[in-house]
Image (cartoon, helix red, strand yellow):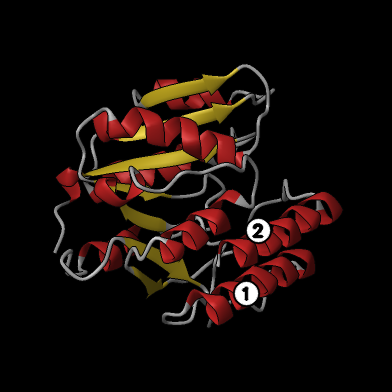
Amino acid sequence: MIELKDVAILIPAYEAADTLGKVLGDWLSFGAVPEQIWVVDDGSPDATGEVARRMKVNVLTHRRNLGKGAAHKTGFKAILKSGFGWVMTMDADTQHDVREAQRFLNLDPSRFDVAIGTRRHDMAGMPPDRWFVNRLTSMVLSVFGGRKPVTDSQCGFRLISAKALGKIPLRTNHFDTESELVARALHAGIRVTEVPITTLYTSPRSHINPLLDTLRFIRLCFRYLMWM
């Protein structure tokens, strides 16, 4: 079992002023303290950063929108310097239930390095474009990973050891970064496991570009094949 106090919480956020406050409030109710929460405001034109600062959490800011992956990398870099042993990532749009973080914390830390939330039983409401790229990247990682199947390579709800994170070089900057992290972890022999979670598709909009991000995911799949 992993203690919550040993976990840093990273939330990449873009135009999330309407939902971020609830996510942060849920984490504080769960038992986290502001000092262990990092929000990366990825160049939001709305009050996303102000909401985070009012909650007294750590706020990192991009002057312009660089992409979800770039926000993750900015957060990872800061957290690795802070001394936390684990990093839990979560989206800012309320699609994840903070209480389900306990499912990750209940895992035996000696048996994994990366735990991915999996929505395999709860994908009925996923927008078609997101379902397609998720199935594509998950299939490629499963077939060529040489280890247990990956069923949800894009889920943003994760728990990653700082030790493993320091060994994973990330090159992408957008929605494909979450799949890249899994691909590089598998390629490096880092232990990956999955945790079943529920997902609510409550966000009024998605920032995924159906064409451009699909092409990015396909490019990532080809790169992964070349690594193998």
Q: Position of residue 56 (x, y in %)?
A: 34, 23
State how far apart marks 1 and 2 are (Cα): 11 Å
Instruction: Determine which quarter of the picture holds residue 143.
Output: bottom right
Q: Which residue is mark 2?
A: 223
Place residue 42 in its image quadrant.
top right
Image location (x, y in percent) of residue 173:
62, 39
- Judge left or right: residue 110 versus residue 92: left
The amino acid sitting under disc 1 is Val
Give me the residue at 52% from left, 44% from top: 92
In the picture of the structure, the residue carrying the numbered disc 1 is: 140
Query: In terms of depth relative to the viewer, which is nearer, 116 or 81?
Result: 81
Question: At 26% across and 35% down in the image, what residue appears?
Answer: 36
Q: Is residue 119 above or below residue 212?
A: below
The spot of residue 102 in percent (x, y) is 26, 63
Residue 106's place in the image compared with 85, above or below, is below
Tell me: 119 left or right of 75.
Answer: right
Quadrant housing the N terminus: bottom left
Secondary element under disc 1, as helix, strand or loop, is: helix
Identify the residue at image location x=82%, y=56%: 210
Q: Secondary structure at mark 2?
A: helix
**Quarter of the image where the C terminus is located:** bottom right
Decide which of tag 1 and tag 2 comes sooner along the chain.
Answer: 1
Q: Position of residue 2 (x, y in %)?
A: 16, 58
Amino acid type at circle 2 is Arg
Compared across the picture, whether 158 is left or right of 7 comes to right
- Crowd class of label 2 (few under 14; some 14 to 19; many from 20; radius 10 Å): few
